[in-house]
Image: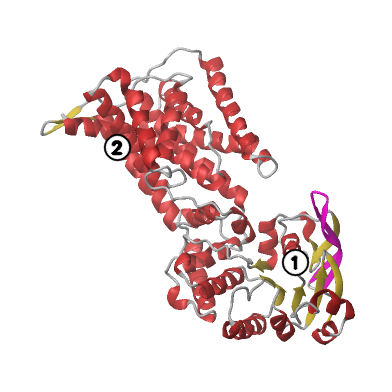
Amino acid sequence: MPILKLSDISMEFGGLRALDSVDLSIEEHQIYGIIGPNGAGKTTIFNIITGIYKPVKGNLFFKDINLKNYPPYKIARMGIGRTFQNIRLFQKLSVIDNLRVSAHGISKVNIIANMLGFPNSRREEKQIMLKSGQLLEMLGLYEKGMELADSLSYGEQRRLEIARALALEPALLLLDEPAAGMNASEKIELIDTIKSIRDNMNLTILLVEHDMSLVMNICESIAVLDYGRKIADGDPASIRNDEKVISSYLGMGA
Amino acid sequence: MFLQQLLNGITLGSTYALIALGYTMVYGIVQLINFAHGEIYMFGAAVGLFLVTVAGFSLVPALLGAMTFCMLLGVLVEKIAYRPLRGKSSRLSALISAIGVSIFLSTFMLLIAGPNTRRYPEVVNPTTYHIGSLQLSSMQIIILLVAALLMIGLNLMIQKTRLGMAMRATSEDLEAAYLMGIDVDRIISLTFAIGSALAGAGGVMVGIYYNAVFPYMGTMVGLKAFSAAVLGGIGSVPGAMLGGITLGILEIMGVAYISSSFKDAIAFGILIIVLLIRPQGLLGKKISKKV
């Protein structure tokens, strides 16, 4: 059973069709890539999965749950974490507090119990600190834990975005153009990071990307979007040889 | 003389600060000027008066009772008048809704309590303490103490607790907070609860200090506290505290050294000058809009 299934999803903005009957099926433990030129509807798909937009048509299922009926924070708590194309960290919070905010989302302790300093809250708070520390370590940010997020370098901020999403303990991680603004060596590092996250944390990764080499390198399955339509999907080899893809996307500059 | 006036100014200013905090916290999170906030303060004064005169409460239980009432009222106002509009209409509609709630609450009070100014009975022994040449009344001490306690508590809450962290995250990026699993509606509700409780405390203390409670008392004080929040930098919690105390001092100094009939003109005049020089307020962040 796929972990995420979009069927016949359409989205419109003021009569303008951003997505047109898109089907996607993502298997558990996959690294799945969505590619397409600017304005193809890639980020719109993320916004629909996370509940920011509600589709005008179609259904989407996470495991067995129809996500259409849930607000964004509940979808996040079910286990869908995301990063943003243009970094949207909580800049005035410390690095570790960025993670703690997410971790609190899935907490079992009431917010009032926390304010009153109940023992169960203190215990959980300790665990959250511990787990957040481990995540920071994994992404090479442990030393920066107490600094404000906006004091980090660009590359570090991108990694913190991933760490913050992981603090939700997601089953599905959405990465919105993770390689944007990175140089070649940073990209190679990123590929390792993404693979090790998938393997160590046993989750499924869906990423949207511009950078063709990254996607071909890392993804086991790829869908190609063009003007809101899915024009192809399959493994990297079949995408590379697909005529529609070549003419509409790879042809440019490749 | 000057020190005495300064002390009086700080006393008045700390009540403005308590009320200004509600404006600034709500603005920080939902970018709404909650014009009904002054009326919440008025209800605090009125409920406190009711608890003291009718129920026979002493000061502290009356204060806590009024704060609780205002907390619930604030949450209710948000739920009924602002939440249904959020995300579905422009900020301007929410602002009009706030003005509507403000008018409703003050006329509602007029309807049930009448237009007369009522006075608190003696809830505090009117002792005056002398420190050198300074005079300090017992009510002044209570105001300064309660305001300081509440503001320290608020700061601890914002810096140390999970709610405070979620509030800071939400005020920075509401949508990102939503996507990180924060129940933003709940955070907004709690922000209204806290801001309204502070205004309620301010209402009781001002009611006792100036010995006057009436249905429209929230209009002018609400406007001043709002100005104090803008003076300090709207959205900034320390800014609201500083702005409130600054405005209180300006007002008292204006009365003491120039003329009492000009007190509001002086206070607001200086406010305008400060904002002309520093539009973002004393502690506000400069907003650079992305084009």
> Where is mark 2, residue-wise?
B144
Q: Is residue A111 left or right of residue A8?
A: left
Please give the range of residues in magenta.
Answer: A4-25
Residue drawn at point x = 39 percent, y = 50 percent: B155
Q: Amino acid at mark 1?
A: Lys
B36 or B267, nearer to the observer: B267
Residue drawn at point x = 76 percent, y = 73 percent: A34
Pointer 2 and pointer 1: residues touching (CB < 8 Å)? Answer: no
Q: Is residue B84 left or right of residue A247?
A: left
Q: CA gap, disc 2 to disc 1?
A: 56 Å
A192 falls in the magenta region: no
Circle 1 packing at 10 Å, graded few (<14), some (14-19), many (20+), is many
The kind of secondary structure the magenta stretch mainly shows is: strand
B149 or B177, nearer to the observer: B177
Badge 2 sits on which subunit? B
SS assignment at label 2: helix
Q: Amino acid at mark 2?
A: Leu
Tell me residue A178's x, y (percent): 64, 74
Q: Is residue A122 left or right of residue B13?
A: right
A89 or A249, nearer to the observer: A249
Badge 1 sits on which subunit? A
Regarding residue B201, the answer to whether it shows in the image is no
> Where is mark 1, residue-wise?
A42
Tell me residue B209's x, y (percent): 32, 25
